[in-house]
């Protein structure tokens, strides 16, 4: 199985109605969607999701932002997707993110940066488990996979 990552379109992406534009980029890159949930992340869930940031000065603001309105939580699959998607997201602060990245094209601040992407295989496993039961992730073949990835011989 190819690598999987957790991608969240955060409340600003939903409220600004750019979720489709973000998903288009994932499809265009050839990623495969294997799970999705549209939900309002509660304060409790946000605190748990961002437990690595406990004690940091921005935690409260981050939790308030993430729990302010619904998010689209998804699992996508592709070889090397964790690193590829981190590059597609761009730097954490929109004001530092390169043009051409999601954050660099859609944001210019320091918190409202539209997307979350797991930062390592360990984080991806934890975050996917956090939102999805195994049977909520769908196994199927993308019929155009061969045309995206080619063959490595
Ligand atoms: N964040 C913030 N202020 C900061 C740093 C981060 O509000 O000084 C928010 C921002 O929305 C970011 C999230 O907290 O996406 C998680 O931070 P992290 O350092 O994990 O950045 P990411 O992995 O999302 O690039
Ligand atoms: Mg992070």
Image (cartoon, rainbow, N blue to C red):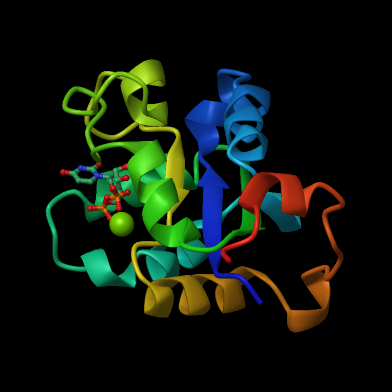
The foreground one among 22 and 60 is 22
State ligand 2's quadrant. Answer: bottom left
Occupied quadrant, residue 78? bottom right
**Measuring 46% from the left and 62% from the top, which residue is drawn there?**
80
The foreground one among 27 and 118 is 27
**Measuring 47% from the left and 71% from the top, which residue is drawn there?**
124
**Measuring 77% from the left and 70% from the top, which residue is drawn there?**
137
Location of the N terminus (image quadrant)? bottom right
Work out whether 99 lies above or below 96.
Answer: above
**Would you say residue 51 is visible in this rendering?**
yes
Location of the C terminus (image quadrant)? bottom right
Q: Position of residue 135 (x, y in %)?
A: 83, 79
Occupied quadrant, residue 77? bottom right
**Residue placed furthest toward the front:** 153
**Measuring 41% from the left and 75% from the top, which residue is drawn there?**
121
Q: Position of residue 145 (x, y in %)?
A: 75, 53
115 to the left or right of 138 = left
Occupied quadrant, residue 100? top left
Q: Position of residue 14 (x, y in %)?
A: 60, 29
Work out whether 90 lies above or below 135.
Answer: above
The foreground one among 138 and 72 is 138
114 to the left or right of 60 = right
20 to the left or right of 56 = right
**Would you say residue 31 is visible in this rendering?**
no
Q: How many dots with numbers?
A: 0
Q: Position of residue 148 (x, y in %)?
A: 67, 46
């Amino acid at each position: 199985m190819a690598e999987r990552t957790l991608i969240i379109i955060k409340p600003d992406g939903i409220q600004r109605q750019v979720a489709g534009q973000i998903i288009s980029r994932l499809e265009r890159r050839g990623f495969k969607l294997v799970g999705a949930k549209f939900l309002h992340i509660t304060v409790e869930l946000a605190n748990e999701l961002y437990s690595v940031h406990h004690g940091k000065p921005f935690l409260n603001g981050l939790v308030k932002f993430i729990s302010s309105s619904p998010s689209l939580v998804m699992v996508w699959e592709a070889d090397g997707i964790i690193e590829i998607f981190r590059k597609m997201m761009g730097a954490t602060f929109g004001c530092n993110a390169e043009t051409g990245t999601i954050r660099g094209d859609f944001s210019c601040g320091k918190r409202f940066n539209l997307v979350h992407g797991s930062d390592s295989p360990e984080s991806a496993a934890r975050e996917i488990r956090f939102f999805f039961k195994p049977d909520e992730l769908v196994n199927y073949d993308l019929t155009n996979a061969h045309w995206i990835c080619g063959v490595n011989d």
